[in-house]
Image: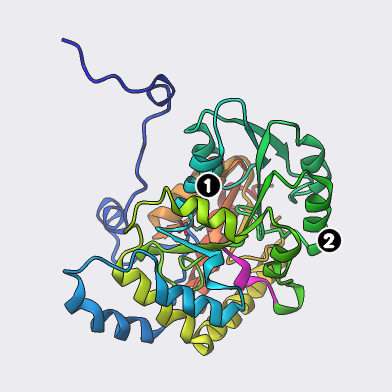
Amino acid sequence: MSFIKIKPWISELPEYIPGKTIDEIKKKYKLETVYKMASNENIFGPSPRVYEALKSVLSEINYYPDSYNRDLRGKLEEKTGIKKERFIIGNGTDQIIEMFCDAILEKGKNIVIPDPTFLTYEKSALKNNASIIKIPLKDFRQDVRSIASAVNADTAIIFLTSPHNPTGTIINEKELRFILEKISSDILVVLDEAYIEFIKREDRFNSYELIDSFKNLMVMRTFSKIYGLAGLRIGYAAADERIIKSIEKIVQPFVVNLLAQKAAIASLDDEDYINKSIDIIISEREKLFNFLNDNNIEFIKSYANFILLKTGAGTGKVVEELLQKGFIVRDGGFLGFPEYIRVTVSLPEINEKFIKTFLCIYEKHINKK
Ligand SMILES: *Cc1c(COP(=O)(O)O)cnc(C)c1O
């Protein structure tokens, strides 16, 4: 009997395998506590104001949310100085990436991305039959010269990430300007700043300020990381008003739910809480760097809330044994770095436990000299 025909390129993709939940891991390894250090979420959770805001809107969930996200746009304008019409809000930045690819890409066009990088860029381009030009990292950094040189007449989007996932390295203002000045202004440059808040203040630049001079720049940020709202799915981007207006025509009206909108506003309002979380994570990151240095373990100096560290040929075993002890980390093999693991910086007491457990496992598998 015949069956529904799926587009060939989808049929050829490998099967989707969902990640394991904390509950599944507890059961499988008979553990009471499991520490998730795999997806770069904020272990502190959101500001207490978020819970208050959520409670107060529970009685309204029978209504559709505001499709234009007016209150959140207003709050973003107040906090950033960027006009509210210049924002687009999505069901996570993942969705914003997809919207822009849907609007811009088609067969014959290409995107230029660093390799490796965040998988969503490539996935969203493939869906639109576009081709992918991959530019290898250089010393674990995005190589802006090679990226700019790789651009051709069919290039429609360049995706840059700062801090980059999974290395945690950054693009500085000079490098971003270099690309923007070198390429044609009809190529969209997406700067994904999902982890911007974890860059020390003295190392940051305000990329929003470049949107005025470069109409083809889009800056993306998310509530999933420092703001602690990954489970609610909400992210945003800022760009020239004309780009945003075009994309708005194709977005489904209610992709950002009511709870997410309210939570995002409340979390933007509690700057003290966010700043305290940032300070702790940065100081914990330093502590982890020191630990790795002291034990001669290779790692990439990260500006984000995760660290890519080298576990060599024994990576699979290290990941599995960490799991048995209740620590979920990301195997670099899935991220383009087969001999590494990516570990999310967590709370002080969890990092402390991680360090001890990791060192035992590492010495068993790696340091057998
Ligand atoms: C986590 C992450 C995001 C955020 O995605 P959301 O869909 O907003 O949760 C975006 N870009 C990168 C590189 C990330 O690592």
Q: Which residue is mark 2?
A: 174
- Which-is-in-front pick, marks 2 and 1? 1
Q: Which residue is mark 1?
A: 100
Residue in the image at 48% along x and 71% along y: 353
| Residue 48 seen in the figure | yes
> In the picture, which quadrant includes the N terminus?
top left
Residue 263 on image: x %, y %? 37, 76
Q: Is residue 278 above or below residue 62?
A: below
Q: Nearer the viewer, residue 40 or 6?
A: 6
Which portion, as a residue range, is magenta?
194-200
Which quarter of the figure has residue 138? top right
| Residue 46 seen in the figure | no
Q: Is residue 158 above or below residue 270?
A: above
Q: Is residue 284 above or below residue 368?
A: below
Q: Residue furthest top?
A: 1
Assign a secondary structure to mark 2.
helix
Q: Nearer the viewer, residue 282 or 205?
A: 205
Assign a secondary structure to mark 1.
helix
Residue 280 on image: x %, y %? 57, 81
Residue in the image at 59% along x and 65% along y: 195
Q: Is residue 184 magenta?
A: no
Residue in the image at 64% along x and 44% along y: 312
What amino acid is labelled 1 in the image? Answer: Phe
Query: How crowded is the residue under tag 1: few (<14 C-alpha within 10 Å), some, or many (20+)?
Result: many
Q: Is mark 2 within 8 Å of ligand 1?
A: no
Q: Nearer the viewer, residue 142 or 335?
A: 142
Q: Is residue 229 left or right of residue 187?
A: left
Query: How crowded is the residue under tag 2: few (<14 C-alpha within 10 Å), some, or many (20+)?
Result: few
